[in-house]
Image (cartoon, rainbow, N blue to C red):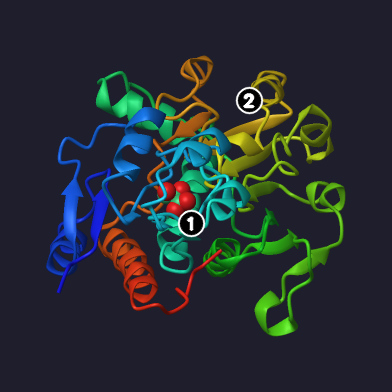
Amino acid sequence: MVRNTIWIPRRLSDATLERAQASYECIINWDDGLSSADDIVEMSAKVDGIIPCHSELFTAEVAERLDPRLKIVANHSVGVDHCDIPALKARGITVTNTPDVLSDATAEIAMLLMLGAARRAVEGDRLVRTGAWDVWSPSFMVGKQVTGARLGIIGMGRVGRAFAEKARGFGMDVHYFNRTRLTPEMEQGASYHSDIESVLSVSDFLSLHCPATPETIALMNADRFALLPDGAVVVNTARGALVDEAALLDALETGKLSAAGLDCFVTEPGGNPAFASHDNIFMLPHIGSATVQTRDAMGFRALDNLDAFFRNETPKDEL
Ligand code: DGY
């Protein structure tokens, strides 16, 4: 039987690559470098499916140029802001993503960022690491406590709910904004706010968990930072585009915010060099889903979607 050919443009987990090679003719980018629009277009003529990550950009321009051989873009990501889905669909290309499987890992990173930002992890680590720690006093490195504090969550999808669950374990009072109110079983006691402004006003800690769409770009702007309680901590593990980074810096420099924890940036890879001199910004390089267990699960979910598609079934995660 003729096997379908797929392109894997990034170094996915070993287990994923092993399973992919057992089922498909695979062209694997072992170098793991980024692919340009021209690379994507060129590869589309050689394969039936692609398993891209959020680093491969399927813009409308790229979609327009894709070869008709390409039938499915089976993303290895839950976020799909790197894909112009209407443009891909207009070319008859099926698009899938990998929801559910990365919720806990991403919520763990949100918790790490929240705690690290609140308890001054960047400063503390540097003091000990450099041997500059030469004093202790009750007024030394005092931070902000999460236990009993109010946590605002914007976007109560799978990751938002996983984070809320972990935050409840820390005794936090959870508030949320979501386009639609959750059922009481899903809310688990969290307080619903029907508009973003209302949830901001009670967010001693704020965590973003919504997708980047034209409506949510720069959702956190100067006006909205101003609505947070003084000394609030902002956490972003969703997408950099949700935050106006200049407004965030301003809010940190004026003391409106006490700290921020960021796993996502407007420019990736790279981040924002203007953040580097601010010890109250605890940063990670977009590693929310980076655990062995989760990366295997993401790869397997993408392959499940491909397998279903090539069996002429509707993939579970078709968008
Ligand atoms: C996602 O799945 O969207 C994560 O950001 C990793 O790509």
Dot 1 surroundings within 10 Å: few (below 14), some, or many (20 or more)?
A: many
Name the spot of residue 63 as percent of width and height, x first.
Answer: 51, 41
Dot 2 surroundings within 10 Å: few (below 14), some, or many (20 or more)?
A: many
The residue at the far bottom in this view is 185
Look at the picture and state if 29 lies above or below 69.
above
Q: Which mark is residue 93?
A: 1
Look at the picture and state if 256 lies above or below 146.
above
Quarter occupied by residue 75: bottom left
Residue closer to the observer: 297 or 234: 297
Look at the picture and state if 8 lies above or below 223.
below
Instruction: Give the distance between the C-alpha atoms of the residues marked 1 and 2, in whole angstroms.
Output: 34 Å
Q: As shown in the figure, which amino acid type bears the numbered disc 2? A: Glu
Quadrant (top left, top right, bottom left, bottom right) of the C terminus: bottom right
Name the spot of residue 69 as percent of width and height, x first.
Answer: 36, 52
Look at the picture and state if 193 lies above or below 250.
below
Q: Is residue 262 visible?
A: no
Q: Which mark is residue 245?
A: 2
Name the spot of residue 191 as percent of width and height, x first.
Answer: 78, 68
The count of marks equals 2
Name the spot of residue 134 as percent of width and height, x first.
Answer: 33, 21
Q: Earlier in the sequence, mark 1 or mark 2?
A: 1
Quadrant (top left, top right, bottom left, bottom right) of the N terminus: bottom left
Q: Is residue 34 visible?
A: yes
Residue closer to the observer: 68 or 130: 68
- Whether residues under marks 1 and 2 lie with C-beta atoms below 8 angstroms apart, the answer is no
